[in-house]
Image (spheres, coloured by chain):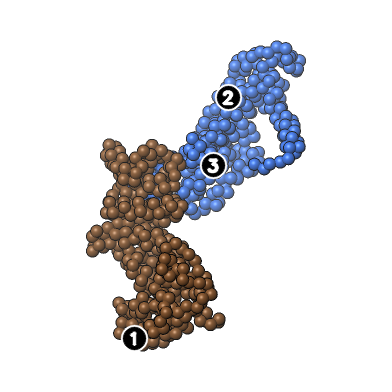
Amino acid sequence: MIALPRPSTLFLAAVTALVAVLLYSPLFVPIVSSFFTISHGDVDWSSPTLSSYQALAGNNDILAALRTTLIVGLCTVVLSVVSGTLLALYYHGGRSGRSILQFIIFLPFLMPPIISGLALLIFFREIGLERSLLTVVIGHTVFVLAIVYRTVLMRLQSMSRTLVEASYDLGATAWQTFWRVILPNLSSAMVGGAILAFALSFDETMITILVTGTQSTLPVRLWAMMRLGFSPDINALVALILMFTVLLCVLAARFLVPQQMAMERS
Amino acid sequence: MNQNTDLLTLRGVSKSYGMVSVLHDVDLSIQDGEFLTVLGPSGSGKTTVLRLIGGLEPLTAGEIRLDGQDISRMPINRRPFNTVFQDYALFPHMTVSGNVGYGLSVRHVQRKEVARRVAEALELVQLGRFADRFPAQLSGGQRQRVALARALICQPRLILLDEPLAALDLELRRQMQEFLKSIQREIKTTFLFVTHDQEEAIGMADRICVMQAGHICQLGTPHELYYKPNCEFVARFFGENNLVAGKLGAVEGEQRPIETALGRLICSVSDQPLLKAAPDGASAFAVFRPEALRVAGSTESDNHFSGTIADLAFAGSSTVATITVGTDNAAQRLRLRVPSRIDGSALKCGETVSLSFAPHEGHLVLA
């Protein structure tokens, strides 16, 4: 750590606190207000209540959207982890066309989502695929694949080549080496990538709006609700999602720390 | 130790990566039960030899025979050899016993049998208490011993060790050298040990194979390499040495003179057909060890010259003097090593001394 003279430490602390309050306090307003009644657009601080949570529980539209989001998220995670891992293995194997492949994988993640969404929409219409949850899952997978791919590839590249050589040297077949040495060393990166993929899929809005059929995911539902005006149960929903996201982030950070370091700490 | 049968032979082995050739036409025989060290500076191709034998890389040309059978194309996981890697390559997600037992469990050996042999192997490397630890929880020396146990457990015909001590500090390295040597004596398995450290090589090997730039320079016992190097590279690389350039004179029985800036030096050429056969006037070096030099009072003996002591370094049991011989523009630096108790205290910096070495302690190599 760099040691600073005391006045500048205090100054830094003040700036940090100010930035934290200005930037991040809006995030906490809905959480706090979700526990109070709202009358005429104002929060009534004198009446703590869980009524907005009750309203949320009774809102079938929202619950259906939440279920849809979870289904899409899980399917996306499975698809992107399997294909992202395979692609990373292919790239790491040093086979032909790998830089073009990598470019294509990163493209949808870097392009504006509206372009990716439109491209997919046109593609689905051309091949005659009805818009449905399937098209949403495909759209999300194309989008989040880069994250899983990158996470797994980085782990692969940090893995010593001699681990694989040692496995063969000790008499293992290629299949045994994959299941017993390579995969276990990738697993935590795959879980970390899966959590990030799920978080991305969870709040993906633009592509979803373009390629979804009749069912809405949660962000799309929220967006539709907002045009009609706020209701208190949205505060409750935001609070719940925020807590859930924090949980996911903590988990992801846990899994993305290399195993070696984690073990040394224990 | 049975040193008569060849376990493994390399014949005409070459290896190149694209246009870059790293091994040229190497012939090498490894005897059953010996501790053979491949010694060379980095880039000499010593690790490549090991990787080719282990099957980690395919040959470009030549063949490798095990008990007379060509195994050049045998896949790595079928070869009865195991490797101790430089970075140990322990599986980080497995415990010590998981690592050691890996070679057996991939061959579907029964679980009870695996457990028994793992316990045995860990006992051998004195790590019985650490069976349930993970590699990250072990010290460098302990990891090293796990890697050795993992390589031993499949009872390979040959154990390949790729600079396994390079990452350890000096004290630990000395301990591990003794440890490796004692294990090798105990299990009577052939060891092929690659290193760039000549001290390590001298201390452990039955035979040493010195490599340079993709060639084998010399293969012999540490004693042979030390006293009869066959080329300038080995003479310079292997221990401290004095080399004086000159032109060969006519052979005189088992001796041959060489005309140098220090005068006419007479050196032994017994058992050296190449040096006996070299034409008169060929460029060569007279080679003599610092401890072969005598500080002599008399001027009657052969190989006599005088020099000035430029520097003295006390090194415990011996004292090393750097001596300048000859005039300024043809000055040559020689090293002299004398026992400290007898002669060390008699030498003084700046003093001129007469020096000589016996012809049988002098040696020739072609330039």
Q: Which one is in front in this view, the residue at disc 3 or the one at disc 1?
A: 1
| Label 2: few (<14), some (14–19) or many (≥20) C-alpha neighbours in 10 Å | some
| Label 1: few (<14), some (14–19) or many (≥20) C-alpha neighbours in 10 Å | some
Which part of the image, by quadrant, shows the N terminus of chain B? bottom left
What is the residue that sits farthest to the top in this orientation?
A47
Q: Is residue A24 above or below residue A231?
A: below
Q: Amino acid at mark 3?
A: Thr
Q: Earlier in the sequence, mark 3 or mark 2?
A: 2
Q: Chain of mark 3?
A: A
Residue at 33% in and 69% down = B224
Q: Position of residue A129 (x, y in %)?
A: 54, 36
Q: Is residue B163 above or below residue A133?
A: below
The residue indicated by pointer 1 is B251
Which part of the image, by quadrant, shows the C terminus of chain B? bottom left
Rendered image quadrant of residue B133: top left
Q: Are marks 2 and 1 in contact (CB under 8 Å)?
A: no
- Count of marks, rendered view: 3
Q: Chain of mark 2?
A: A
Q: Is residue B339 above or below residue B102?
A: below
Q: Determine if residue A55 is in view.
A: no
Q: Amino acid at mark 1?
A: Val
The residue indicated by pointer 2 is A66
Q: Say what secondary structure mark 1 lies in.
A: loop
Measured Cα–Cα span from mark 3 to mark 2 = 27 Å
Say which chain is brown: B
Q: What color was chain A assigned in the picture?
A: blue
Q: Determine if residue B149 is in view.
A: yes
Q: Which circle marks residue A151 in the picture?
A: 3
Rendered image quadrant of residue B287: bottom left
Q: Say what secondary structure mark 2 lies in.
A: helix
> Between residues B111 and B38, which one lies in front from this camera angle?
B38
